């Protein structure tokens, strides 16, 4: 089976405008993510960019990017536009990789791809163990609840995704925002209007669950910090500058 990775990206993020082009160790965040995706070596990598500046930056750093319209409500709608623009006859799986996670673990990307190829799942994502209980109360950290205990070998079904957990529950994990669709499921997902649940919680994966699309969850060794705020940016910079 052949996989295509598409990374949606836009400059107009509300909490941290211009985020994709912020530089860490001399390279933009979006280009760091692109290089991680290439390193995973599971298929071709494209950036679906709302802004010409992002396209220029990615290309300057050796990547591929395609300009999209700026009316998309979600990242998945954005990647679907790019998917339709290219020759996809030989593509089976499409990965939506978040453009603001330069610390994403390459092995976790590979593991999700492997699980999707081995199974007949419609849609796959990642979940990591919650190491710090304070994460449960953080609304900017999405949690995933699974039918069974998640481990390195299985691929259990997701029951729900939530930001707000008022009590500890069984089989709850730190959701890592990466999605791997089979081609037909991506087309189906895009055909549905945004669900009430999705809009209320600002979680596009709820559109899938609300329309009876099953989501399976692969084990992630690592829950990366997504760059949403200035504090996130400082934390990510510290880790990446220390590593280099």
Image (tube, grey):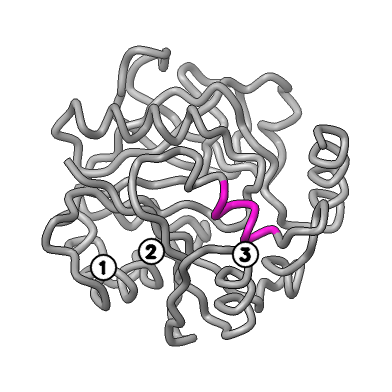
Query: Which of the 4 image quarters holds residue 207?
Result: bottom left
Residue 61 tag number: 3
Q: Main secondary structure of the magenta part?
A: helix
State left or right for residue 60 relative to residue 127.
right
Q: Quadrant of residue 31?
A: bottom right
Q: Which residues are magenta?
A: 29-35
Residue 31 belongs to magenta span: yes
Q: Which quarter of the figure is the N terminus placed in? A: top left
Q: Which mark is residue 76?
A: 2
The residue that appears at 80% across and 49% down in the rendered structure is: 232
User: Along the horizontal axis of the image, is 193 left or right of 96?
Assistant: left
Mark 2 burial class by Cα count in 10 Å: few <14, some 14-19, many 20+: many
Camera-nearest residue between 186 and 199 = 186
Q: In the rendered view, tell whether residue 196 sits above or below residue 173.
A: below
Pick the quarter of the image with the C terminus: top right
Q: Residue at x 43, y 87 (%)?
A: 69
- C-alpha gap between disc 3 and disc 1: 31 Å
- Please give the label number shown on residue 190: 1
Q: Nearer the viewer, residue 184 or 52?
A: 52
């Amino acid at each position: 089976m052949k996989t295509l990775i598409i990374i949606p990206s836009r400059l107009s993020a509300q909490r941290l405008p211009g985020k994709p082009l912020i530089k860490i160790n001399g390279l933009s965040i979006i280009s760091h993510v692109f290089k991680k995706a290439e390193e995973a070596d599971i298929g071709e990598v494209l950036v679906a960019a709302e802004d010409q500046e992002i396209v220029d930056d990615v290309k300057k750093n050796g990547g591929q990017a395609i300009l999209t319209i700026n009316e998309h409500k979600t990242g998945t709608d954005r990647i679907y536009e790019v998917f339709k623009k290219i020759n996809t006859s030989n593509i089976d799986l499409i990965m939506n990789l978040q453009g603001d996670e330069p610390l994403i673990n390459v092995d976790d990307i590979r593991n999700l791809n492997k699980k999707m190829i081995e199974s007949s799942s419609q849609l796959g994502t990642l979940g990591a163990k919650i190491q710090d209980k304070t994460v449960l109360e953080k609304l900017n950290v999405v949690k995933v609840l699974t039918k069974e205990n998640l481990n390195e070998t299985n691929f259990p079904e997701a029951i729900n995704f939530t930001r707000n957990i008022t009590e500890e529950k069984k089989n709850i994990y730190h959701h890592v925002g990466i999605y791997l669709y089979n081609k037909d499921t991506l087309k189906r997902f895009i055909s549905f209007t945004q669900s009430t649940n999705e809009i209320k919680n600002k979680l596009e994966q709820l559109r899938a669950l609300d329309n009876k699309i099953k989501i399976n969850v692969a084990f992630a060794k690592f829950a990366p910090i997504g760059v949403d705020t200035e504090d996130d940016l400082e934390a990510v910079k510290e880790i990446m500058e220390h590593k280099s």
